[in-house]
């Protein structure tokens, strides 16, 4: 892990995996460790939860990278953190690439107001846009030499990868062309192009969605048409960055059946898309300081003490230890099964903690565990 963070050829690290496995905390821990070892880091979370801000001692995060306080920067590093605000990113894209009058019309459109904050897929599109912005800024001013990305939970992390292709399919689809035809052709030409079948479809859509909603959608798509092409180009450029040697992916999982199945799915997909997988982070791994005290010996000892009230605490400790060793065995078997399927994937392990990570010291401890694991 330290070799990965120290490699100046690595410009982007993407943490992906199913929900609830600790991706956000892992991304924050790696960002802190890299910064304290001399890298200039920006960590971006796409998770709407506030865990990243809390663990870094910040009251809140927003769409602008902010310096994380109390970080040891004696090695010359920097740590900034942000949380994707998909609506603000969408607004910024419109402001940057549309004329002022056009931008005002877009912002006033009711359908845009809904789409920019809650439309399916918008978060992934805007995550790709924001990553592209951060990467471009790093090239211009050199503020960061490493960007660490925390992705949405479960397979929506793959939606992040699919955003350019899905956006291209959307813009090139028949339905979008039909919506754009009135604005592009206009007047009598519009009447000639839209035959009886198209009018029938439009009538059905009017009845299903309402005439005003359909009008809002047509107006919005026409207004966005001039900027979506540029967005698609930028998203495809960002996708190319994700396939480049400068980018490394970390699949984060816990030693549980569902999480490791998802990890296998991610691993296969990344290999299919020719994206560089740095390894698997196996989080919350259980350990024991008494590995020679087996389940059988623990239970036998507990049974021998069952009728001795003065040793009740010891009996309970032995039974808890038996459960712990049994769980360790299950986790080991699951890890071996994953390793058998992907023998070339390195694994970094982080031991399970008694409490959740909630501050910089906790993040430092996790980073140390990952580096040693």
Image (tube, grey):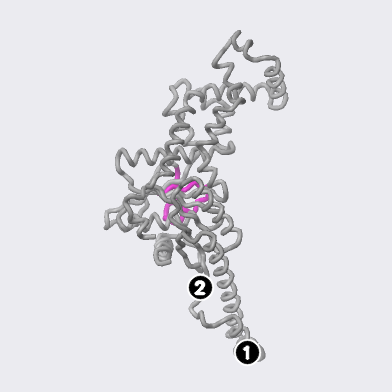
Front residue of this view, candidates 373 and 271: 271
Residue 243 appears in view: yes
Front residue of this view, candidates 277 and 44: 277
Q: Is residue 129 above or below residue 254?
A: above
Asked whether 45 falls inside the magenta stretch, the response is yes
Image quadrant where residue 323 sits: bottom right
Magenta stretch? 43-62
Q: Secondary structure at mark 2?
A: loop
Image spot of residue 93 (x, y percent): 45, 31
Magenta stretch prevailing secondary structure: loop
Q: From mark 2 to mark 1, how far is it between C-alphas?
A: 25 Å
Of the numbered discs 2 and 1, the one sitting upstream in the chain is 2
Q: Is residue 42 above or below residue 357?
A: above
Task: Name the residue rendered at 55%, 50% in the picture.
Answer: 153
Q: Quadrant of the N terminus?
A: bottom left
Asked whether 61 falls inside the magenta stretch, the response is yes
Task: Name the residue rendered at 59%, 79% in the picture.
Answer: 322
Image spot of residue 143 (x, y percent): 31, 44
Counting other residues with Cα less than 10 Å from the Cα at mark 2, is it few (<14), some (14-19), or many (20 or more)? Answer: some
Q: Is residue 171 above or below residue 17?
A: above
Image mark for residue 287? 2
Residue 53 appears in view: no
Front residue of this view, candidates 334 and 127: 334
Query: Which residue is denoted by mark 1 in the rendering?
Result: 305
Q: Quadrant of the C terminus?
A: bottom left
């Amino acid at each position: 892990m330290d070799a990965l963070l120290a490699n100046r050829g690595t410009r982007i690290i993407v943490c992906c995996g199913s929900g609830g496995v600790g991706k956000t905390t892992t991304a924050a821990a790696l960002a802190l460790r890299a910064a304290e070892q001399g890298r200039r880091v920006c960590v971006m979370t796409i998770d709407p939860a506030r865990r990243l801000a809390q663990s870094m001692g910040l009251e809140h995060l927003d769409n602008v990278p902010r310096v994380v306080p109390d970080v040891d920067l004696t090695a010359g590093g920097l740590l900034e953190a942000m949380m994707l605000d998909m609506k603000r990113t969408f607004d910024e894209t419109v402001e940057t690439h549309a004329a002022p009058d056009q931008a005002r019309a877009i912002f006033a459109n009711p359908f845009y107001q809904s789409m920019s904050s809650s439309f399916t897929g918008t978060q992934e599109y805007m995550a790709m846009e924001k990553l592209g912005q951060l990467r471009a800024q790093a090239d211009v001013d050199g503020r960061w030499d490493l960007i660490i990305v925390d992705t949405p939970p479960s397979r929506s992390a793959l939606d992040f990868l699919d955003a350019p292709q899905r956006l291209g399919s959307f813009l090139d689809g028949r339905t979008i062309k039909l919506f754009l035809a009135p604005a592009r052709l206009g007047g009598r030409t519009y009447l000639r192009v839209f035959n009886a079948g198209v009018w029938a479809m439009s009538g059905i859509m009017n009845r299903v969605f309402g005439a005003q909603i359909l009008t809002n959608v047509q107006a919005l798509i026409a207004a966005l048409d001039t900027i979506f092409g540029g967005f698609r180009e930028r998203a495809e450029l960002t996708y190319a960055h994700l396939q480049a040697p400068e980018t490394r992916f970390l699949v984060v999982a816990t030693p549980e059946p569902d999480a490791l199945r998802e990890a296998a799915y991610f691993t296969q997909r990344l290999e299919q898309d020719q994206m560089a997988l740095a390894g698997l982070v196996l989080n919350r791994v259980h350990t024991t300081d008494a590995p020679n005290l087996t389940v059988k010996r623990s239970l036998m000892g507990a049974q021998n003490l069952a009728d001795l009230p003065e040793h009740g605490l010891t009996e309970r400790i032995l039974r808890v230890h038996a459960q712990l060793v049994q769980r360790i065995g299950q986790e080991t078997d699951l890890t071996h099964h994953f390793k058998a399927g992907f023998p070339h994937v390195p694994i970094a392990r982080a031991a399970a903690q008694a409490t959740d990570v909630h501050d910089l010291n906790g993040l430092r401890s996790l980073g140390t565990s990952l580096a040693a694991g």
